[in-house]
Amino acid sequence: MQQRPVKLACRDVWKLFGEGADRFLADRRAARGMVPGLAEIQAAGLVGAVRAANIEVGEGEIFVIMGLSGSGKSTLVRCLSRLIQPTAGEILFEGRDLLRASEREMVRIRRHKMGMVFQHFALLPHLTVLQNVAFPLEVQGIARAPREARAREVIELVGLKGREAYYPRELSGGQQQRVGIARSLAVEPEIWFLDEPFSALDPLIRREMQDEFLRLQSVLRKTIVFITHDFDEAIRLADRIAIMKDGAVIQVDTPERLVLAPADAYVAEFTKHIPRAKVLTVRAIMRAGPPAGEMAGEVSAADRIEAVADRVEAADRPFAVTDAGGEVIGSIDRCAVIDTLIGREPRR
């Protein structure tokens, strides 16, 4: 994957809840090389919500944080935006440590540079769609005409044109979530935080919202930090995924690498039930090098196996595999696809 400039990073970030958390961590960290373990934190009557977290989010990347309930993913995201004050560490946004910013500066950064969407839509029931979407701009002090013009732009962008005068109670759950998304986009954020935004929706609407999210990202190219506990959703949306457990980041990698090279038994268990064809790309199972003989067609190295399986299985000849520039870099045949579908190691 091409290296992206780092937009947001956290370095050795901790968040401990409980009386004396700051002193406890400072004392342990003052001892050379001493990092408190989970058992020691719990023995001190503290909760280790985030422990020594290190991540980097690239510009224009969809970075997914996932884990089971209580793993620390929502706390970490709130630390990244400083809605929660970390106990220790650095939060670097565009190279600046947000922990050194004043509260007034943080309010300005959140208002002008950060967009946030949460599981609960939190729309203002007495305001129309147009007024809800324009509300962040009103808070910024922008005059009515330009803020409503901007609100209409993003309402159209999320597919709600014609519903500007509706109230939240007159909308479906999916439409309400679109209003929440439009509201967060109205300020043209440089980074977008989404905390399980679709988990309250039923499966069909959730899939539609994922499609809409990917469409928006293809247009906007935002830097996105997205929380989910659903691995299917993560692999559909993510450029990279961070898996958390007990407040610690266990592994950060592409969906494909998480399945092919899990960092430990926990990650392996977390990913073992995911159909490999949904995750693996053609590049992972292709035969590298110039293909021999006549080809049935071409597929992209970046395609998921699931997307090309029917075509490749139905052909009596291999397919050439091309890179992003259209150059042929290998081939793939029906045997390799079948091996992937049934979970057998591809024959080389």
Image (tube, rainbow, N blue to C red):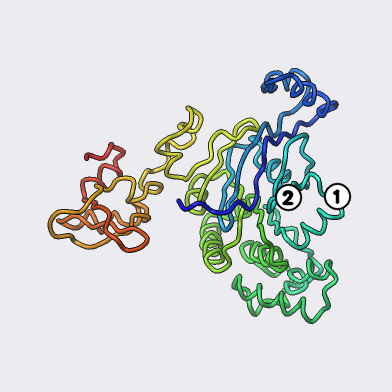
Residue in the image at 59% along x and 73% along y: 159
The one of 191 and 90 positioned closer to us in this rendering:
90
* SS of the residue under disc 1: loop
- Give, as a three-letter code, the residue at label 2: Arg
Badge 2: residue crowd in 10 Å (few <14, some 14–19, many ≥20): few
Q: Is residue 344 above or below residue 285?
A: above
Q: Is residue 184 above or below residue 86?
A: below
Q: Is residue 61 above or below residue 175?
A: above
Residue in the image at 61% along x and 70% along y: 158
Badge 1: residue crowd in 10 Å (few <14, some 14–19, many ≥20): few
- Between discs 1 and 2, the one toward the N terminus: 2
Residue in the image at 37% along x and 43% along y: 276
- Give, as a three-letter code, the residue at label 1: Ser
Residue in the image at 67% along x and 61% along y: 190
In-image side of 70 versus 318 (left or right): right
Query: Are the residues tagged 1 and 2 within 8 Å (C-beta)?
Result: no
Q: Quadrant of residue 86?
A: top right
The one of 34 and 250 positioned closer to us in this rendering:
34
Residue 11, percent from left and from top: 67, 38
Location of the C terminus (image quadrant): top left
Residue projecting furthest to the bottom: 145
- The residue singled out by tag 2 in the image is 96
Count all numbered tags in the image, as a single digit. 2
Residue 302, percent from left and from top: 37, 55
The tag on residue 26 is: none
In-image side of 152 versus 331 (left or right): right
Mark 1 and mark 2: Cα distance apart in space: 12 Å
Judge depth for marks 1 and 2 and give the one in front. Answer: 2
- The residue singled out by tag 1 in the image is 102
Residue 120, percent from left and from top: 70, 54
Residue 324, percent from left and from top: 37, 60
